[in-house]
Amino acid sequence: MHQAKLTLDPAFKVAPVSRRTFGTFVEHLGRCVYTGIYEPGHPTADADGFRRDVLDLTRELGVSTVRYPGGNFVSGYRWEDGIGPVADRPRRLDLAWHSTETNEVGVDEFVRWCRKAGVEPMMAVNLGTRGIAEALDLLEYANHPSGTTLSDLRIANGAKEPHDIRMWCLGNEMDGPWQTGHKTAREYGRLAAETARAMRMVDPKLELVACGSSSSSMPTFGSWEAEVLEETYDLVDYISCHAYYEEKDGDLGSFLASSTDMEYFISSVIATADHVGARLKSRKKINISFDEWNVWYISRFQDAGTPQDWPVAPPLLEDHYHLADAVTFGGLLITLLRNSDRVTAASLAQLVNVIAPIMTEPGGRAWRQTTFHPFAQASRHAAGDVLRVEPDSPLYETKVYGEVPLLHAVATHSATSGTTLFAVNRSADEPLPLEIDTRALGGVRIVEATTLTDPDVYARNTADDPARITPRPNADVEPDPLRVLLPPVSWNVIRLA
Ligand code: AHR
């Protein structure tokens, strides 16, 4: 049988755990907003029409920030459509998802929902069909305390206190030809720079995100980041990365190793950003906002196509995740954490119904998808500093990435809440014995060891069987020396005090 080893040493720190790693995303897409977070008339709806069952699950998921309102949607969005009396709000064509947008939810409702959920709002501005003036108007409406037409309008609309939105995305996926108002890197870089410069005149402390590539396979990947950062380097804090993965052609081995691409993506963007910084003789470092990541069966969506008849909140991108999806997802989360020195913000795309950890029935039940669990456990138990973990692992051969380690792992350590190891066994058919050297931690006690696994790697959670895939205690643990058996295709959490 294969055997893996790793050492936990609190002296080897990558960076503090960034709470913003545990961000998600709410887009006006399909049923994410309507019948997702918002459904007046639902049995659990509160006075504002927000589903309490979804609010509870959002809190349980441990979400830090929520990006809004898109996504592709934002590139045709007029934010003013979503303020004021709901009955007066216009209905518009949403070109991105070929749907009708009713505008019942807009910026004020979204921020109200964020306060109830205990999450930080992160706002994207439209740099597709719009530009600097509209971004400034939204910023003034949202964040200026009072005394101007737009800030007083927010107060008149019921939001006395400023929304105080700190993180702003300068557009969305502007490198993609599918994006309304798609631009070349130079065109986008200039617009992003001037929008950022103007927004900073209002508030120099805003945290601004320039659009990077919508995947590492884009033909402009690398040159896009370089050109955009040449224009924006001194004006922004982050460059974004977006990445989605799916199992293709029954190739489970490569799918489980998807974080290999994410790692390559991150290291390439860091190298590119630092190269631009060096050429500009800047000491500033640009960090990564990995503000869309997930497993997404995009090929199924492309086969189905967009709706033809402009429906309101149609079921779109409603992937039902199985165990192998959750384990791949856990591997992506491990990679984000391993790169915490430069990936200081991330948004799981998305939160509810649309490629989401939370699913709902209109008027009915809400439940946790398999991917809910790695996210919730990592958000709850990652604390203090991320530790540099260098596993000594057997390799396996994949069609897409060549030889890849069976074990993928990261740990966090805090003087008060202890040490937690997050580990994935990518083997499709064999358990992986793992020996953990804890000598640098002093005496340790196992607080909890759980595993997310199932004999059927394609088993899913459903409304009728919502806990089929859920973390369960792992009994195959020995304390001294610390040994744990990781089941095939499993996500594992080992907590030590
Ligand atoms: O998350 C779904 C879509 O994926 C987003 O709208 C877009 O930004 C990306 O292509």
Image (spheres, rainbow, N blue to C red):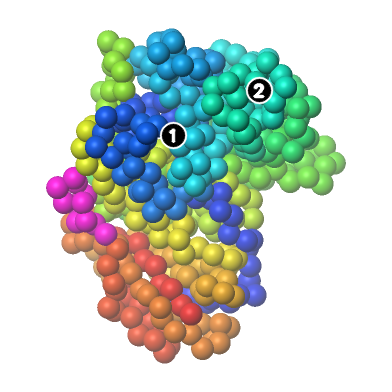
Q: Is residue 470 above or below residue 72?
A: below
Which of the 4 image quadrants contains residue 397?
A: bottom left
Task: Give the magenta range.
Answer: 459-470
Is residue 453 shown left or right of residue 25?
Answer: left
Q: Residue at x 26, y 53 (%)?
A: 323
Viewer-nearest of discs 2 and 1: 2
Disc 1 residue type (three-letter): Val
Instruction: Judge whether residue 134 is colored magenta.
Output: no
Which of the 4 image quadrants contains residue 203?
A: top right
Q: Is residue 362 above or below residue 412?
A: above
- Mark 2 or mark 1: name the one nearer the start of the chain: 1
Q: How far apart, in angstroms, are the residues tagged by discs 2 and 1?
A: 24 Å
Circle 1 SS class: loop
Given residues 459 and 90, the one toward you in this image is 90
Residue that numbered label 2 is attached to: 151
Q: Position of residue 350 (x, y in %)?
A: 41, 38
In the picture, the disc for residue 26 is 1
Disc 2 residue type (three-letter): Ser
Q: Residue at x 40, y 21 (%)?
A: 104
| Dot 2 and dot 1 residues touching (CB under 8 Å) | no
Given residues 170 and 148, the one toward you in this image is 148
Instruction: Answer whether residue 240 is visible to the viewer in this image.
Output: yes
In the picture, the disc for residue 173 is none
Is residue 174 shown left or right of residue 85?
Answer: right
Disc 2 crowd rating (10 Å Cα; few below 14, some 14-19, many 20+) is many
Is residue 352 shown left or right of residue 365?
Answer: right
Instruction: Judge whether residue 463 is colored magenta.
Output: yes
